[in-house]
Amino acid sequence: MRLYLAKTLEGLSMYGSIYNLGSGVPDKVEDYAMEYQEYKWMLDNLIDRINASCDTLLDDGDVDYIGAEKCKDLVTLLENLPDGFVPEDYKVVTVLKNFATRAIEYNTGIAIEM
């Protein structure tokens, strides 16, 4: 139930074929812990859209990495969400867009842990 931004990929370990952004390296990774309500909302309303746009396989309990190129698709998806789609008090989508935008700038990526 976290979002991770890789500030750099240098020195990060791999978990299979994806970068291990949950490795607790604060100078290389920034994270955001979702509130339970945000997590549940994402799972019910946004994850299928992210999977379709970013070629991920996220579901409850999964982690997937989205590289800088696919982050462009993610930003486009988030920018085109219908008005009122995201509950006003949920900041998870704002953080997700911020992390994806910065990953493009840094040429790194993000991870979503459900």
Image (cartoon, rainbow, N blue to C red):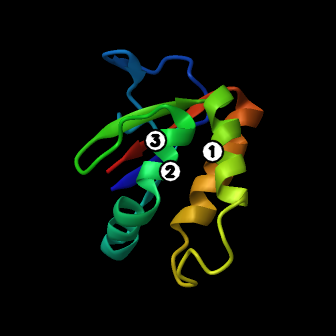
* Observer able to see residue 77: yes
Compute the Cα span from label 3 to label 1: 10 Å
Q: Is residue 86 left or right of residue 20?
A: right
| Mark with earlier residue (3, 1) | 3
* Observer able to see residue 28: no
- Most distant residue in the left direction: 61
Q: Residue 102: horizontal and vertical position, in percent?
A: 70, 43
**Is 58 or 5 nearer to us in this picture?**
58
Measured along the vertical axis of the image, is residue 40 above or below residue 53? below
The residue that disc 3 covers is 51
Name which residue lies at 33% across and 38% down: 63
For badge 3, the amino acid type reads Asn
Mark 2 element type: helix
Q: Is residue 60 left or right of residue 14?
A: left
Q: In which quarter of the view is residue 23 placed?
A: top left
Residue 49 is marked as 2
Q: Residue 81: horizontal and vertical position, in percent?
A: 65, 64
**Is 40 or 27 nearer to us in this picture?**
40
